[in-house]
Amino acid sequence: QVQLVESGGGSVQAGGSLRLSCVASGYTYSGYFMGWFRQSPEKEREGVAAIYSAGGATYYADSVKGRFTLSQDNAKNTLFLQMNSLKTEASAMYYCAGTRGSGYGPPLAKSKYNYWGQGTQVTVSS
């Protein structure tokens, strides 16, 4: 059973930084996607960034390119999302997600993902 546990959310002023972490357990696939999604009360859940475990190819939403960076610590089964130059519109619940195998569809499509964490709240104030 795959489990994903996020941490690292919090409150920060616009222009600041946060680093989110996602610890994954139970994965037995050799290749799968891990991603970060976010959802605010007035919006649908949207893909922010994703990485393919075999090879490390990364994918970013246009709105975060150049400011957010994915990295992983394979020894600790941990995925990180470094978020810099945060804007107020980044305020949302952030979810870590994983696919069963390579999954189907684009890397940032929520329908591609089978496993979800409980989320960690990010609040960016002006």
Image (cartoon, grey):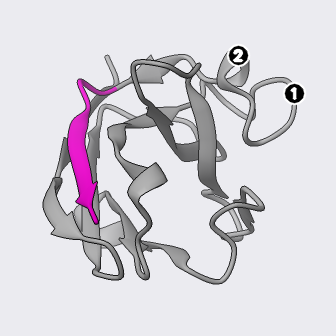
Along the line of sight, which residue is nearer the eye, 65 or 29?
65
Specify whether residue 119 is painted magenta.
yes
Q: Is residue 30 visible?
A: no
Q: Nearer the viewer, residue 98 or 13?
A: 13
Q: Quadrant of residue 45?
A: top right
What is the span of residues highlighted in magenta in the rendered image? 117-126
Contact flag, marks 2 and 1 (Cβ < 8 Å)? yes
Residue located at (23% from left, 24% from top): 118
What secondary structure is marked by label 1? loop
User: Which corner quadrant holds the C terminus?
Assistant: bottom left
**Which residue is tagged 1?**
105
Please name the residue that numbered disc 2 is placed on: 111
Image quadrant in which you'd find residue 56: bottom right
Instruction: Give the crowd class for mark 1: few <14, some 14-19, many >=20 residues within 10 Å.
Output: few
**For this view, does 73 lie left or right of residue 105?**
left
In percent of the image, x 52 and y 76: which residue is there?
A: 69
Q: Is residue 80 left or right of residue 33?
A: left
- Residue 54, label in figure: none
Residue 106 position (above or below residue 57)? above
Report the side of 97 relative to 61 (left or right). left
Q: Is residue 14 magenta?
A: no
- What is the quadrant of the N terminus in the image? top left
Q: Earlier in the sequence, mark 2 or mark 1?
A: 1
Task: Name the residue located 69 percent from the left edge and 61 percent from the top edge.
Answer: 63
Percent of width and height locating residue 30: 61, 46
Q: Amino acid at mark 2?
A: Ser
- Residue 34 rendering spot, x and y as whole percentages: 54, 45
